[in-house]
Image (cartoon, helix red, strand yellow):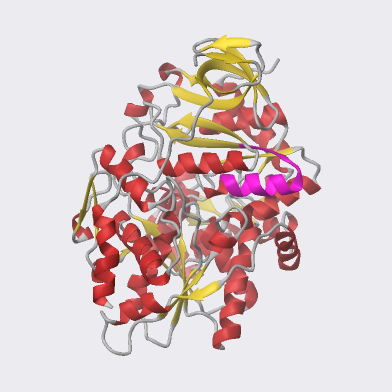
């Protein structure tokens, strides 16, 4: 019998992953730190044509693209004449299971099915669980979803409890845990016990699945407006949504579209803290994931993360929890669609960004998600209050994550906070070199870092110099 | 109802790691607590009462064991209390337009 202790299981990580993914990541590694990202994507995924065919077969994709005329008009009341871009939204809630996550899940579950796995496992507290469960149901595969959901009092985030219910509705087993990164240990144990496929959020198939979203946006906007969107705003956490959407836009030819990441500011809250866990109203799409995953993508549940935002992101902004609740109301009360709230992070940012843009420009919010019991502003704010969080109207500038949620009085009070993307790139370079005790790299590593950061050679060399890293 | 019969839908509890066994990178407040796990399924044993060590068959068909904590576990999440701060937004927007 195998040793199931924490240490023993964690030490079998690579072996378990190889079996559960069917990918040998070492094939793509070269130089001292480099790996061939594009080759990994190409050899372990599907073409755009195949992706779209698989998705159509399983009730995913071709979601409606709506222009938010009333919200756009509202924005224009607060800006000088000639400003206020047209805001569009891709209604991803229309996918099977109610979110864009179905795009990721559809390709991974297809891959599992094609490779002969009997079931799939996903570690997620988000919409992705239901997406995998729904796709597995259609392919006749078994499904287990592992969630981080409770604090030590067994009090669960209403949003996550709803996601558990939805997974069960599609016939999945849900394993629920208290807070902590050792979720990964439970995940590995289940993979080993069942021999199921690791439907990770971060595999090449998961990212390829999202590419169709960027591709559809580019094609649909071009078809109706005669040009590609000027900007696309993407809620950013682990980075897959942004990476896949950007790659899809590029594949469709929208090379000049600005890719803007948006996260809810949860600075100061520790993601693995038992106390902090229920003091946040957003379980994803926040800076607690967005920043660390940007600067160190290979921290996920796969050896090499296919989600690498700094290769694509032009700008990264944060907004507050209160902003997102406010725009969720806007979407319902002005546009007549009840969605989110978490998925409306990018909408909140887009409203603020649209103010800076010209009126003939187009900004696309690339997702919505279903709403329901637990996953709705009322239960989430009720829950916040029951955890001692102050909820009030006012200027969100005064809000403190974990202490208060301030819902703006008007859209004028939705402020963008820019995260310095150049600093993130610098951190990524540091994390991939000196932080790994690598003080000398090769020319090919240098070229790799240029791709990782979307920077030219001189800029990367400058950053390496600061960290004391030499190039052979 | 505190007695579960064979095939009843139940929830079981397991301690995955005791407080002492928690990973080194876990923050201090979390380290004081065990890593707990809950799983639902159909009771395999003929009969059991709350607190008994039982075997269940989960929705994925997996057979697993743990302490029986709930019989017929209910989804308790709902739409919360009315939130005045949200209710007023719609009215404001109509005045604004």
Residue A323, image x, y percentages: 31, 60
Overall secondary structure of the magenta stretch? helix
Q: Residue at position x 51%, y 27% from top? A: B73
Q: Residue furthest front?
A: B1
Q: Is residue A420 left or right of residue A203?
A: left
Q: Nearer the viewer, residue B57 or A106?
A: B57
Which segment did they paint magenta? A129-144
Q: Residue at position x 65%, y 16% from top? A: B6
User: Where is B73 relative to A118, above or below?
Assistant: above
Q: Residue at position x 64%, y 29% from top? A: A190
Q: Is residue A136 magenta?
A: yes
* Quadrant occupied by the N terminus of chain A: top right
Q: Count numbered badges in the picture.
A: 0
Residue A365, image x, y percentages: 47, 69
In terms of image quadrants, where is residue B41? Answer: top right
User: Where is B9 relative to A414, above or below?
Assistant: above
Could you tell me if residue A419 is visible in this image? no
Q: Nearer the viewer, residue B69 or A271?
A: B69
Q: Nearer the viewer, residue A106 or A12?
A: A106
Q: Is residue A216 left or right of residue A449?
A: right
In terms of image quadrants, where is residue A195? Answer: top right
Residue B87, image x, y percentages: 28, 58
Residue A9, image x, y percentages: 61, 25
Q: Residue at position x 64%, y 27% from top? A: B58
Q: Is residue A287 magenta?
A: no
* Quadrant occupied by the C terminus of chain A: bottom right
Could you tell me if residue A229 is visible in this image? yes
User: Where is A149 relative to B67, above or below?
Assistant: below
Q: Nearer the viewer, residue A421 or A101?
A: A101
């Amino acid at each position: 019998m195998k040793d199931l202790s924490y240490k023993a299981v964690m030490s079998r990580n690579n072996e378990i992953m190889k079996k559960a993914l069917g990918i040998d990541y070492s094939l793509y590694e070269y130089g001292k730190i480099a790996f061939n990202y594009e080759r990994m994507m190409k050899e372990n995924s599907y073409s755009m044509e195949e992706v779209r065919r698989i998705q159509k077969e399983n009730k995913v994709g071709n979601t409606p693209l709506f222009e938010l005329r009333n919200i756009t008009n509202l924005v224009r009341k607060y800006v000088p004449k000639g400003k206020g871009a047209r805001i569009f939204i891709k209604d991803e809630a229309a996918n099977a299971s109610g979110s864009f996550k179905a795009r990721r899940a559809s390709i991974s579950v297809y891959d599992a099915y094609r490779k002969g796995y009997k079931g799939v496992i996903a570690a997620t507290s988000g919409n992705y669980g239901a997406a995998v469960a729904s796709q597995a149901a259609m392919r006749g595969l078994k499904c287990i979803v592992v969630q981080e959901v409770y604090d030590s009092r067994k009090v669960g985030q209403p949003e996550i409890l709803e996601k558990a219910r939805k997974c069960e509705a599609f016939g999945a087993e849900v394993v629920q845990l208290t807070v902590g990164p050792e979720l990964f240990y439970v995940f590995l144990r289940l993979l080993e016990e069942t021999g199921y496929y690791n439907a990770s959020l971060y595999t090449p198939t998961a990212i390829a699945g999202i590419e169709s979203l960027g591709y559809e946006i580019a094609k649909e906007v071009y078809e109706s407006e005669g040009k590609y969107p000027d900007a696309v705003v993407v809620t950013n956490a682990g980075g897959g949504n942004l990476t896949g959407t950007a790659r899809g836009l590029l594949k469709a030819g929208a090379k000049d579209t600005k890719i803007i990441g948006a996260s809810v500011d949860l600075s100061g809250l520790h993601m693995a803290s038992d106390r902090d866990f229920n003091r946040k109203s957003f379980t994803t799409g926040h800076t607690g994931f967005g920043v660390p995953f940007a600067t160190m993508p290979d921290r996920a549940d796969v050896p090499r993360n296919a989600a690498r935002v700094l290769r694509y992101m032009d700008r990264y902004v944060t907004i507050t929890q209160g902003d997102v609740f406010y725009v969720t109301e806007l979407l319902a009360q002005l546009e007549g669609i009840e969605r989110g709230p978490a998925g409306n992070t990018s909408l909140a940012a887009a409203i603020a960004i649209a103010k800076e843009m010209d009126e003939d420009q187009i900004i696309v919010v690339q997702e919505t998600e279903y709403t329901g019991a637990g996953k709705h502003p009322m239960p989430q704010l009720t829950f916040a209050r029951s955890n001692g969080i102050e909820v009030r109207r006012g200027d969100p500038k005064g809000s403190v994550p974990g202490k208060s949620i301030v819902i703006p009085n008007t859209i004028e009070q939705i402020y963008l906070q820019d995260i310095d993307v150049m600093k993130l790139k610098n951190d990524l370079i540091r994390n991939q070199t000196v932080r790994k005790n690598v003080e000398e790299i090769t020319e090919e590593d240098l070229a790799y870092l240029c791709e990782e950061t979307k920077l030219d050679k001189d800029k990367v060399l400058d950053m390496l110099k600061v960290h004391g890293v030499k190039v052979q | 109802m505190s007695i579960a019969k064979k095939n009843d839908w139940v929830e079981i509890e397991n301690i995955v790691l005791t407080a002492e066994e928690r990973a080194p990178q876990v923050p201090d407040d979390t380290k004081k607590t065990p890593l707990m796990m809950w799983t639902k399924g159909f009771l395999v044993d003929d009969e059991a009462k709350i607190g008994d060590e039982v075997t269940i068959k989960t929705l994925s068909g997996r057979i697993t064991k743990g302490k029986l904590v709930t019989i017929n576990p209910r989804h308790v999440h709902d739409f919360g209390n009315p939130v005045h701060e949200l209710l007023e937004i719609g009215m404001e927007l109509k005045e604004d337009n």
